[in-house]
Amino acid sequence: MGESGNFFAPAFSAFDAYTYLIMVLVGCSAAFTMRSIGSLVTATIAALAVFATAVFLRDVVSTGFTNEQAASLITSDWTGLLTMRFSTLCIYALAIGTIIAASYGILMLVRD
């Protein structure tokens, strides 16, 4: 268990409570838009894009709406996205996919 903790911890160490909240909200909303569990991969990829956009917009709003700060934030976030390790992206996809699957399962239990 220690090795898996060392594998997952760096991916989520920079997150704060609001980032976790955004991740859960995006995952639950993606679950509500799915027609069947067969579209889990598509919903996960779309949720990753929405999650990245939401976190970026949260950073823009928290720093203010000046053009200079937004431009530097765009540059730094784009550089961070380009240098992101594939394993980190897979961890994010696994986390959001798990949230979507759990939310969809609960939704199907409630509907029936």
Image (cartoon, rainbow, N blue to C red):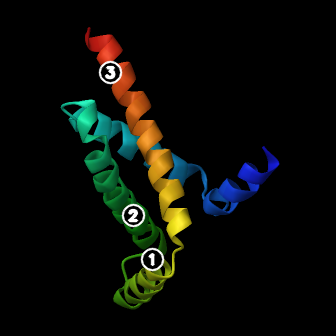
Rendered location of residue 76, percent (x, y): 48, 85
Q: Residue furthest top?
A: 112
Q: CA distance from mark 3 to mark 2?
A: 25 Å
Q: Residue 64, which numbered label?
A: none
Rendered location of residue 11, percent (x, y): 61, 61
Which amino acid type is marked by label 3?
Leu
The mark nearer the N terminus, 1 or 3, is 1
Which amino acid type is marked by label 2?
Ala
Seen in the picture, residue 47 relative to 71 is either above or below; the reply is: above
Question: Which residue does the image show at 39% across and 20% down from the upper left?
Answer: 106
The mark nearer the N terminus, 3 or 2, is 2
Element marked by disc 3: helix
Element marked by disc 1: helix
Q: Residue 107, which numbered label?
A: 3
Rendered location of residue 4, percent (x, y): 72, 50
Seen in the picture, residue 57 relative to 109 is either above or below; the reply is: below
The residue identified by callout 1 is 81
The reply to whether the C-beta atoms of the residues labelled 1 and 2 are less than 8 Å apart is yes
- Neighbour tally class for label 1: few under 14, some 14-19, many 20 plus, Cα within 10 Å: few
- Neighbour tally class for label 2: few under 14, some 14-19, many 20 plus, Cα within 10 Å: some
